[in-house]
Amino acid sequence: MPKRNPLQRRASLPRLNALVEARVLSQDAWERACQIAGHTPREQAWLKFISRTILTLGVVFILVGIGFFSAYNWVEPHRFVVFGGIQVALLALVGFVYYWGIDALLGRLALLAASVLVGVLLVVISQEYQTGADDYQLFATWALLMLAWVLVGQWGPLWLFWLVVVNIALSLYGDQIVGSNCDAGIYLAAIVLNSAALAVWERGRSREIEWLQARWIPNLVGTAILVLATVVSIQWLTFDGYYDWQSESYQSSRYFALNLAPFVYLGVLGGVIYGYYLWKQDLYMLAVGGFSVIVMTAAVIFSWAADFDYDSEFGIMTLACLAGIAIIVETGVLATALVHLHRHWEDDE
Amino acid sequence: MNFFRYSSIEDVIEQLIDEGYLEPEDIDAVTHVLATSPEPESPAPWFVQVLIGLGAWLAAVFCLLSFAIVMGSSIQPAGAIFFGLMLSLMALAVKYSQPSDFLRGQFALVLALMGQIQAIVGFGGATESVTATLWATIILEAILLVAYPGLVQRFISAALIIGALYWLILLGPLTWALHLLATVLAALTVALWVRAPFLGDSTTQRGINQTLSYALPTGMFGGLLLPVLELHLRWVAGSEWTTANFDKPLIASAGLFILALWLIQEILERYHLAGRDRLVRLLGGGTFLIAVATVQTPGILAALLVLTIGFWRNDTVLMGLALAFMTTFIGVFYYNLQTTLLVKSYILLTTGGMLVGLWYLVFQRRQVIKEK
């Protein structure tokens, strides 16, 4: 097979760097070569970046300023002034969305700002009228009111913001209603909720829906799911009984939700492998899943310590050493596998 | 983010010749270099490096626990220093035996971490002096930064050197120098990235440059975050700490503003962007607005600076770092005690409104960006 002409190869960054190192290209020539090959932005991309940064920063400052203003808890103005101000701002933002359209960045930012203002309005209402409602009800109402805009807006950051509000509502429900007797139940509910959201996103992505093509949002949600699954599984491993406020007695056996934890963890891991190795290629999710396994290995080793006499230093020393060696081997093997996979997938592209 | 279009080396070289960057005779030299250089392998993604680092820390903690149990209270500070240095040397030997093997590299990294922790703690025990221990840390980490051929350990070394310098400043009388150091780190970050690629006369130099390209901005952000952590530091250092210890953030704000202006000028010159004078006024004005609004929290301007560099060099890790810290600094602005919440809200609303207005006047009215 004839050798490929080196000049016909792709102008990748490592190849351009090799030319600079060999003093064939000067610094200026390298800079220009990167622009030509697309490794650094061109004029229009720069102008877009500057435009979007100034606009986004301006909107974020305004939103945060409104948040600070409402948090100031100003008692002097009449409540209608405060309510009126927020509602006028809300109407103005909805007007902007209608004028600019949801396809334009300004329209989307205005929709996000309006969604935030809905929450601010609910907070001011709860401050002014002490109804005795729980905090989780505020966030749940906020999420419900925002939902239509999220569906219409078709914008990733807005969707993520809505998911964060829903998760806060769930967490507050766990704190205020369920209590510490069933921490695991809330974790599992959060895992199911976020997994459903992730599944919807990935399904949409596979159908080439444009606004669902970004990777950082599903990666963030996937990371959160793995963290939750790992934490609740460690809770299951290290369970040492709990005080049941309802029966006012100490319970030594695991409750139902906690018993589900290892199955849910294995299910999440299976989902990561199926979704990001067999179905789609996403090295980041595989790395996070792998690290979760490493953490669980250490937790399993130390859960055996529960069977040891705590006065036995030899036992603890052995476990610590074993855990350290296991982590070294696992991390080394995982890193090697990931890099190999990365290069293999790059060659396939 | 992908500006990439499929261009062959030939396409690029031809255009460089047309534009006068190269001579036609240089094609032979290009062909020779590409034919004789080994095909570069793509490096491990950033999250694999993070995974390696986290795994090494976890393993080092467990191994140290095991070591502490074995030695018990019998180990003396001098013994800890000796063992620590021996472990560090072992780590170097293991790493150099097979630099590209991940398993061996992981083992070496764990040994290095254990060695550093033991040596530093031992030195602290022997001298009972925080200042002396910090200087010993700086020396040890500087040696490892040069000698250890691994990105993760070099990053840890650079971060520890910067952290030790911050701590030394905080122990001294001139605590405002904290802001000066953060500004110097920002300037070094800009200088390093502007001169990309990260070249050097040797593999070691290139490796150090590559590490510093991320360690310097991280250290800068850490320093700018310290005043926000003032309450926690007070708990650590005692009741002598007051908010006055972190005054003069204007030093960092002014320094970062000057750097930002220089970077704007540099980018516009290199790119020969159309309407340069108007853009310089817009960007200079916008940067000034942001610098004034966030003078008490210069981290926001620093994050913008790093975000711009990351966009320029198409480095998503740097951009992610900038966005993460920008979010953090905007959030911690809430806790800044120099002004009331009401005044802060006015500042943000006014600045935000002016930025949106600036954007509308320049980009929307003048149709600067051609939509496809």
Image: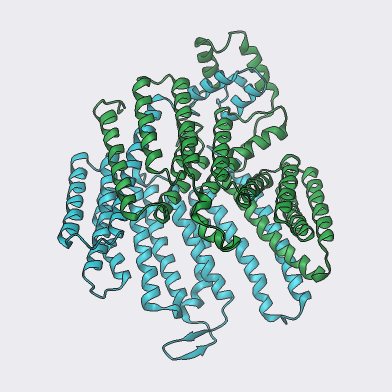
Chain colours: A cyan, B green
For the residue pair B107 and B205, the one nearer the viewer reads as B205
Residue A233 is situated, as x and y percent measured from the top left of the image, at: 54, 70
Left or right: A125 as drawn, with respect to A170: left
Residue sitting nearer the eye, A337 or B179: B179
Q: Quadrant of the N terminus of chain A?
A: top right
Residue A184 left/right relative to B166: left
Residue B180, by quadrant, is top right
Is residue B189 visible from the viewing direction of this image? yes
Residue B276: x, y in percent? 38, 21
Q: How many marks?
A: 0
Q: Is residue B242 above or below residue A176?
A: above
Q: Quadrant of residue A12 in the image?
A: top right
Name the residue at 42% across, 72% down: A186
Q: Nearer the viewer, residue B112 or A23?
A: B112
Along the horizontal axis of the image, is B178 left or right of A3?
A: left
> Left or right: where does residue A304 sit relative to residue B302?
right
User: x, y percentage for residue B308?
Assistant: 46, 35
Residue B106 drawn at (x, y percent): 71, 52
Residue visible at 25% across and 50% down in the picture = A152
Instruction: Please determine whether, in this image, residue A327 is positioned above or below residue B105.
Output: below
From this view, report whether residue A309 is shown above or below residue B52.
below
At a point 79% along the width and 43% down the height, the residue shown is B96
Tell me if residue A266 can be seen. no
